[in-house]
Amino acid sequence: MVTTNLKDYFHEASLTSLLLATAICAPSVYADSPVQLSVPTINLPAGDVSGVRVSALYGRSHNVKGLNFSVLGLSDIDNFTGINLGLFYGANRTRTSMKGFELGLANFNGGTAKGADVGLVNYTASNFTGAQLGLFNYAGSLNGLQFGFMNATNHINKGIQIGLINFDRSGTFVSKDLPVFPLVNARF
């Protein structure tokens, strides 16, 4: 009789533990994580982030909203909203959309960006709205400010370039046939 009661007790305890673990873990499957550590090939915990993310050496995540730290390497995100800080030779890469502030050795945006990029190299493949501050700045199209040693864009929609070399493929304020102008170039 004792054996049966002991078996029942362990069976009920196992079932209760399983249900409790499922209840605790289920929200993390559907909700964004408030904290994530991202290292090569592993995100702890996996999924999107709404909070703080730390990427060491290399980390890849899909969607991050909040504060992102890239330490000694590259933080690679599809869509980012918030503050992106590259620390100790950290660089930032956003593949699709960036909204916010980026500070890093290099900031690469494969799609659109809105906000501010501060780094040695700032690159946005598509439309950039805001301010790029660095040695080299590039935006597919520019709405805002580029301030650096060399600034480049395919077209200034509305904005200004301030630097030693300013390149606008669609021409400068002096002439549409002159794509390079020193010190200042603008279109309003």
Image: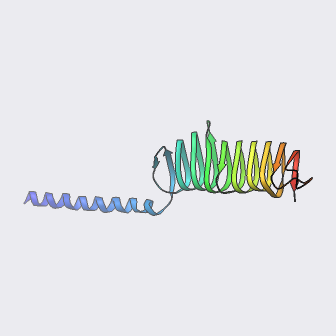
In the displayed structure, 59 sits above or below 141; it is above
- Which quarter of the figure is the N terminus placed in? bottom left
Camera-side residue of 23 and 138: 138
The quadrant the C terminus occupies is: bottom right
In the image, 10 versus 78, the foreground residue is: 78
Q: Residue at x 63, y 48 (%)?
A: 84
Left/right placement of residue 19 relative to residue 93 reads left
> Residue 34: x, y in percent?
52, 54
Quarter assignment of residue 16: bottom left
Compared to 89, does 51 lie above or below?
Answer: below
Q: How many marks?
A: 0
Residue located at (65% from left, 48% from top): 108
Given residues 92 and 187, the one toward you in this image is 187
Res. 115 visible in picture: yes
Return the x and y of residue 49 as percentages of the image width and height.
53, 55
Asked whether residue 119 is in view, the answer is no
Hey, which residue is sitting farthest right in the picture?
A: 174
Viewer-closest of 81 and 3: 81
Dividing the picture into quarters, in which one does residue 136 lie? Answer: top right
